[in-house]
Image (spheres, rainbow, N blue to C red):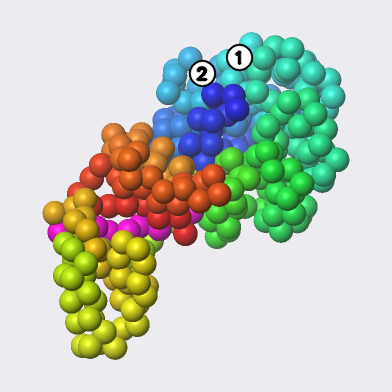
Amino acid sequence: MDKLLRHVGEIGLVPVIKLESAGKAVGLGRALVAGGIPVAEVTFRTAAAEAAIQAMSQELPELLVGAGTIVTVDQAQRALAAGARFIVSPCWVDEVVAYCLEQGVPVLPGVVNPDGVAKGLALGLEVLKFFPAGTAGGTAMLDALAGPFGSAKFVPTGGIDASNVADYARRANVLAIGGSWMVRPDLVEAEDWASVEQLCREAVFALHGFAFGHLGIDGRDEDGCRTVAGSFQQLFNLPLKEGRGSIFASDRIEITKHPSMGAKGHLAIRCNQVERAVAHFARQGIQSRPESAKTEKGLLKAIYLDLEIGGFAVHLLRA
């Protein structure tokens, strides 16, 4: 996969922006970066789009700027000249796709059915826009496409907001999710960048869906593990389930048969996609511990962060 698109996937969200004034572009871009979403798809639906892309690209090198609603080669040429680094179309336009491939520029044409996906894969496009997602089958359609098109990734856009973004984020074939709920037009018009930044932060947490998974207690050895697990069963009638390396008392308390990575044990935090969460924390300077990674069907199931909270190691767990 193209390195730029891989980076988009690590961010996981693509704000779809409509700007009536290029003068608001840099302020909006700064709010996106501060809110944890350093990417923007500036749509060519207004006369200000070209200048907005240029302003963002020049003033905010940390912001990955793309152009959306591109339906002609002329628009693609102008967008790229202004500094856009990727092109998004709401539908399949042969001329635009061909031009971007010639230029070596990532392009995400919009598709809604198997024919469009097959056409994209035949041209070597691994990532496609799924639009309009909400009225084209949503997550059910993405699940249906996953079977015959296992290598295809999608950026669903349309009808997605904070209430359902997690449903899309859980899908293995969803690279990132496009939307405009975090860049509300009234806030942009008022240049209320603090509110935009806050909405971005909320969108990031909605995307990841972080939630408490379980508490890990260090049983030290197998005998100690059984003693602790027996106490939970005897005192609270919690059901026990034994695995190779631990015993669970209910589904919220794990007693390990071997010393834990943390001084006191570990905390498991569930998330919608472990790979994306690892990248999220890496951007904050918190690395993961590769030796602890566990995979399932080619996806990360769990991994420890190089972090302790109150003496407890923290590991991410796919929901």
Above or below, 253 against 95 in this view is below
> Badge 1 local density, few (<14 within 10 Å), some, or many (20+)?
many
Magenta-colored stretch includes residue 267: yes
Three-letter amino acid code of the residue under disc 2: Ser
Q: Residue at x 67, y 34 (%)?
A: 127
313 left or right, relative to 281: left
Q: Residue at x 47, y 59 (%)?
A: 319
238 left or right, relative to 134: left
Q: Residue at x 22, y 74 (%)?
A: 226
| SS for dot 1 | helix
Three-letter amino acid code of the residue under disc 1: Ala
Residue beneath disc 1: 82
Residue beneath disc 2: 57
In the image, residue 248 lies at what x, y percent?
32, 72
| SS for dot 2 | helix
Q: Give the residues in magenta.
A: 264-272
**Which image quarter is the N terminus in?**
top right
* Residue 269 location, quadrant: bottom left
> Badge 2 local density, few (<14 within 10 Å), some, or many (20+)?
many
The answer to whether residue 245 is visible is: yes
In the image, residue 49 lies at what x, y percent?
64, 24
Q: Residue at x 74, y 43 (%)?
A: 149
In this view, the residue in front, 192 or 37, is: 37
Above or below, 157 against 310 in this view is above
